[in-house]
Image: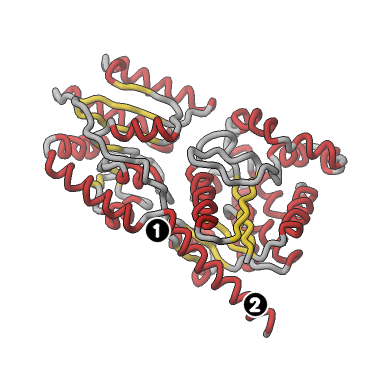
């Protein structure tokens, strides 16, 4: 069986979903499975070896131009290929990332409309490419592609699996009337998808209810990481608090800074290290965070590293006593939790979204009241004062990740589901 796994590029930034898709494809191939990883929108960016194909379908430039100008819905193939040139897509990706979800309602609906949308030319190219690849099962990356998946299934007669990746954060912010129309279309198109896959049980339940998905087709396959290089080290004093995620309001860096300031004002010796992608649209947000640190005369006690490579990420984690990403929304994944634990770093996370599930499964951290700076500061202080407990959490979490959250285990579970879906589809055709 050949599986073609479509993965949505994230406009030039490191993205948990992209890295998951790349890691899954690599692990499946290592297990002898026939998997082709095909990028959509932009090339993938990952801190592990990229196993995706060079060609990008639904290239971001073509998708946008076909949305705004009828001329580009009729351009010849050589122009489309030029606009899909990977180097060009990489170059414009960071500019495209500035676009806020509020401005994308019409485009999101059009892609969901598939054959009736303005990107039908892109759909036809994708179907031709999948036919040439002789796909037996197609995985689409998120619910925004549920319409594309349905069209692929109708054209090729193959089963379709759809990822559930936290798209509620984006789709809930679409303006009306597009939000209502998009949700209605997702519910309608979901009938033609054979299975949906979330990375946590929390998000499987949430997405099924939130988007009206058939609950019997929604599955959860735990995240897996490649953590062999995430080795443990003894961090130097003072007590070091880390943040490893995109720098944006949704991820809650401002709250962590407020808690850090409170700790320092209480006379606690500690420092803060921050790593993660910063988009152009979020630079004013970081400026406000930095202003808060300057007002507290603590700018010199907080280090901002920006994006980090794989080796830099390992060194960053090894420098920490604790990791905290106090996300303001209900996170559907949380790869940084598993990566920190794999490196022997305990975590403190808000008690919502996927975090209670991950903490319960690994035993590697503490939960605190969401959105409460005092509760976060108290949790940080508790681990600062109790080294044996920190060590216990770290050891327990590291052991659990190495046993239950491996790329190999994730790949094996995914393939079992793909086989079940393919067998069920074959049975329906035979009947």
Return the mark for residue 426. 2
Q: Which colour scheme appears in the figure?
A: secondary structure
The location of residue 59, given as percent across then percent down, is 70, 41
Disc 2 element: helix
Q: Earlier in the sequence, mark 2 or mark 1?
A: 1
Is residue 325 toward the left or the right of residue 177 in the image? left
The location of residue 167, given as percent across then percent down, is 53, 49
Is residue 306 toward the left or the right of residue 21 in the image? left
| Residue 358 vs residue 291, the one in the foreground | 358
| Residue 17 vs residue 422, the one in the foreground | 422
In the rendered view of the protein, which quadrant contains the N terminus? bottom right
Q: Is residue 290 above or below residue 249?
A: above
Q: Nearer the viewer, mark 2 or mark 1?
A: 2
The location of residue 180, given as percent across then percent down, is 60, 53
The residue at 24%/53% (across/down) is 363
Disc 1 element: helix
| Residue 313 vs residue 297, the one in the foreground | 313
Query: Mark 1 = which residue?
Result: 202
Work out which residue is located at the far bottom of the displayed protein and give it.
431
Q: Is residue 305 above or below residue 355?
A: above
In the rendered view of the protein, which quadrant contains the C terminus? bottom right
Q: Is residue 405 visible?
A: yes
Is residue 32 toward the left or the right of residue 261 in the image? right
The residue at 71%/45% (across/down) is 58
Return the mark for residue 103. none
The location of residue 366, given as percent across then percent down, is 23, 46
The residue at 68%/39% (across/down) is 60
């Amino acid at each position: 069986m050949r599986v073609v796994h479509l993965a949505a590029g994230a406009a030039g930034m490191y993205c948990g979903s992209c890295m998951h898709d790349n890691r899954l494809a690599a692990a499946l191939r290592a297990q002898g499975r026939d998997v082709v990883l095909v990028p959509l929108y932009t090339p993938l960016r990952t801190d592990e070896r990229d196993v995706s194909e060079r060609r990008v379908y639904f290239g971001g430039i073509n998708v946008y131009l076909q949305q705004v100008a009828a001329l580009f819905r009729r351009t010849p193939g050589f122009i489309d290929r030029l606009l899909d040139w990977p180097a060009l897509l990489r170059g414009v990706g960071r500019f495209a990332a500035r676009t806020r979800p509020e401005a994308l309602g019409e485009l999101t609906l059009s892609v969901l409309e598939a054959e009736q949308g303005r990107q039908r030319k892109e759909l036809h190219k994708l179907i031709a490419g999948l036919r040439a690849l002789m796909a037996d099962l197609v995985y689409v990356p998120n619910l925004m592609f549920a319409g594309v998946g349905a069209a692929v299934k109708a054209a090729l007669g193959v089963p379709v699996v759809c990822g559930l990746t936290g798209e509620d954060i984006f789709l809930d912010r679409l303006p009306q009337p597009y939000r209502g129309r998009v949700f209605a279309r997702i519910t309608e198109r979901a009938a033609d998808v054979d299975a949906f896959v979330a990375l946590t049980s929390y998000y499987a339940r949430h997405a099924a209810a939130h988007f009206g998905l058939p609950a019997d087709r929604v599955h959860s396959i735990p995240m897996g990481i490649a953590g062999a290089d995430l080795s443990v080290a003894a961090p130097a004093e003072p007590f070091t608090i880390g943040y490893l995620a995109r720098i944006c309001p949704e991820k809650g860096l401002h709250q962590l800074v407020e808690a850090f300031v409170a700790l320092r004002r209480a006379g606690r010796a500690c420092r803060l290290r921050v790593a993660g992608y910063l988009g152009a649209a979020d630079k004013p947000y970081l400026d406000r965070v930095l202003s808060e640190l300057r007002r507290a005369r603590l700018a010199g006690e907080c280090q901002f590293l920006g994006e980090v490579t794989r080796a830099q990420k390992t060194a960053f984690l090894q420098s920490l006593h604790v990791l905290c990403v106090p996300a303001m929304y209900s996170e559907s994944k949380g790869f940084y939790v598993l990566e920190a634990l794999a490196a022997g770093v305990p975590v403190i996370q808000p008690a919502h979204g996927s975090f209670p599930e991950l903490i319960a499964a690994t035993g590697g951290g503490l939960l605190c009241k969401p959105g409460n700076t005092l509760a976060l500061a108290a949790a940080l202080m508790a681990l600062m004062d109790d080294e044996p407990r920190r060590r216990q959490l770290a050891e327990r979490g590291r052991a659990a990740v190495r046993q239950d959250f491996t790329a190999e285990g994730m790949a094996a579970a995914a393939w079992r589901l793909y086989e079940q879906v393919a067998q069920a589809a074959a049975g329906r055709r035979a009947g």
